[in-house]
Amino acid sequence: SPAQNGMVASSVISHKSGEVLATCTDLIAIQTLSLSDKMKSFHDICKKLGRSGHAKTPRICIQIRREFLLVDSLEAIMSLDKEELKHVWRIQFVGEEGVDAGGLRREWFHLISKMLLDPDSGLWMCCGGNQMNLQIHPSSALYCEDDLLLFRFLGRVLGKA
């Protein structure tokens, strides 16, 4: 096969654990597979990459009161240190039953993004005649005294999304 003619000893190795996830022989064999089998092999290697080096990604529970969504979220997220930002965020709305299997977190991201990206908040202004294009409002400090903190918070939220 063409792959064997130009064969270079290589493999897919986890940068965290040093574990070999796929050998050169594995990679050559994958080239001869059907597209669906190639995709399955790719997903299998990605799963191994995701879990190599540690058994489980640490989780952090963030408790939010809906009536104080922005304040509680801001306090919780801005209090996280560099390592805690990498943890999986589990959102719990205070006084509500429900385990966050992704749906609560998705709802929280939607609500926070909608609130912070609203042009009426004073943080943004529409540009280019299109309401879908936003830019930082040059006078955002006049409309919101915590504008820089909110921009930093939004950066953390969007970085996690």
Image (cartoon, rainbow, N blue to C red):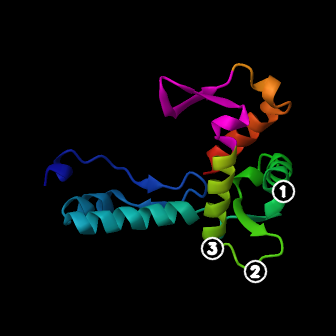
Q: Which mark is residue 13?
A: none
Q: Nearer the viewer, residue 113 or 122?
A: 122
Observer-side mark, 3 or 2, equals 2
Does 120 lie within the magenta span?
yes
* Quadrant position of residue 1: bottom left
Q: Say which of marks 2 and 1 sits in front.
A: 1
| Residue behind mark 3 | 101
Instruction: Find disc 2 in the rendering and name its residue.
Output: 97
Q: Is the residue 123 above or below the residue 52 in the image?
A: above
Q: Nearer the viewer, mark 1 or mark 3?
A: 1
The number of numbered discs placed on residues in the rendered structure image is 3
Disc 3 residue type (three-letter): Ala
Q: Residue at x 66, y 55 (%)?
A: 111
The amino acid type of the residue labelled 2 equals Glu
Q: For numbered disc 1, what is the local secondary structure?
A: helix
Instruction: State which region is magenta.
Output: 116-137
The quadrant where residue 116 appears: top right
